[in-house]
Image (cartoon, grey):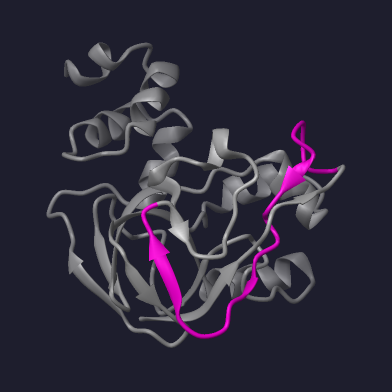
């Protein structure tokens, strides 16, 4: 498993970018080594800090294999970074990655936290009809990470899995939990160190944090 491309982007004004009218979804390949900080990669910006500014969404990764799956279905080439990811990976099953799984990439350590939830900005950026539904049905979401140890990384770096929880929940399963699978959501809430974003999902899906953890 390795990193094919490290991608960063600046926030720009865009009329199609939802209510904010501003986005940094256009990520482009960064040359050389890139510093990894607690809030993300050096040189990368987030326009919508309300929905994308959480420390548990510091780094977003998408697999080249998933791009290869999408290309014939979308009828176009998809360059690394096209979905707005910071890290384009090769050989990594991101859908099967476990919440809480830790990777060493370069000198940084990252921890899997959350699936990508498609939004109107993502849809408008790609200009694909019915994109939110199609992306959701495919379930090839990529994965968000929090930064456990700051460092630096670059294209070509190997991905070393440092820790993989014995009884974890995969990114694919967590995406189903987000969309209403209460049993999976309760499992997530029982994981030590789970993102507090899941507590907010629980209030929506299950009604309350208390109810979610009572079974």
Residue 127 position, x and y percent, is: 83, 53
Q: Position of residue 147 (x, y in %)?
A: 32, 56
What residue do we see at 23% from left, 34% from top? 187
- Residue 69 on the magenta span: no
x then y, percent, for residue 83: 64, 61
What residue do we see at 35% from left, 60% from top? 96
- Residue shown at 15%/49% (left/top)? 167
Q: Is residue 43 above or below residue 91?
A: above
- Where is the N terminus found, in terms of image quarters? bottom left
Q: Nearer the viewer, residue 32 or 209?
A: 32
State whether the magenta stretch is mostly helix, strand or loop.
Answer: loop
The magenta segment is 16-38
Q: Is residue 145 above or below residue 185?
A: below
Q: Is residue 77 left or right of residue 43?
A: right
Q: Is residue 72 left or right of residue 106?
A: right
Q: Position of residue 174 (x, y in %)?
A: 37, 42
User: Is residue 71 left or right of 14 when viewed as pictured?
Assistant: left
At 44% from the left and 43% from the top, the residue drawn is 175
On the picture, is 182 further left or further right than 81?
A: left
Q: Is residue 101 placed above or below 4 in the rendered structure?
A: above
Q: Quadrant of residue 30?
A: bottom right
Residue 30 shown in magenta: yes
Numbered circles on residues, count? 0
Q: Is residue 138 or residue 15 the one in the foreground? A: 15
* Residue sitting farthest toward the left: 166
Quadrant assignment for the C terminus: top left
């Amino acid at each position: 498993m390795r990193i094919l491309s490290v991608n960063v982007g600046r926030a720009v004004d865009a009329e199609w970018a939802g209510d904010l009218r501003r986005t940094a979804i256009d990520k482009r390949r960064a040359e050389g080594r890139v510093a990894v900080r607690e809030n993300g990669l050096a040189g990368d910006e987030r326009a919508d800090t309300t929905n994308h500014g959480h420390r548990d969404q510091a780094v977003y990764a998408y697999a080249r294999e998933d791009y290869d799956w999408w290309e014939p279905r979308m009828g176009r080439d998809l360059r690394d970074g096209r979905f707005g990811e910071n890290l384009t990976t090769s050989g990594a099953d991101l859908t099967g990655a476990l919440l809480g799984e830790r990777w060493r990439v370069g000198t940084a350590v990252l921890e899997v936290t959350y699936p990508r939830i498609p939004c109107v900005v993502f849809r408008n950026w790609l200009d694909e009809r019915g994109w939110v539904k199609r992306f959701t049905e495919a379930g090839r979401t990529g994965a968000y990470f929090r930064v456990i140890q700051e460092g630096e990384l670059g294209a070509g770096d190997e991905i070393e899995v440092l820790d993989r929880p014995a009884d974890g929940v995969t990114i694919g399963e967590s995406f189903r939990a987000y969309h209403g699978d209460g049993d999976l959501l309760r499992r997530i809430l029982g994981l030590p160190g789970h993102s507090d974003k899941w507590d907010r999902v629980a209030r929506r899906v299950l009604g309350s944090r208390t109810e979610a953890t009572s079974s």
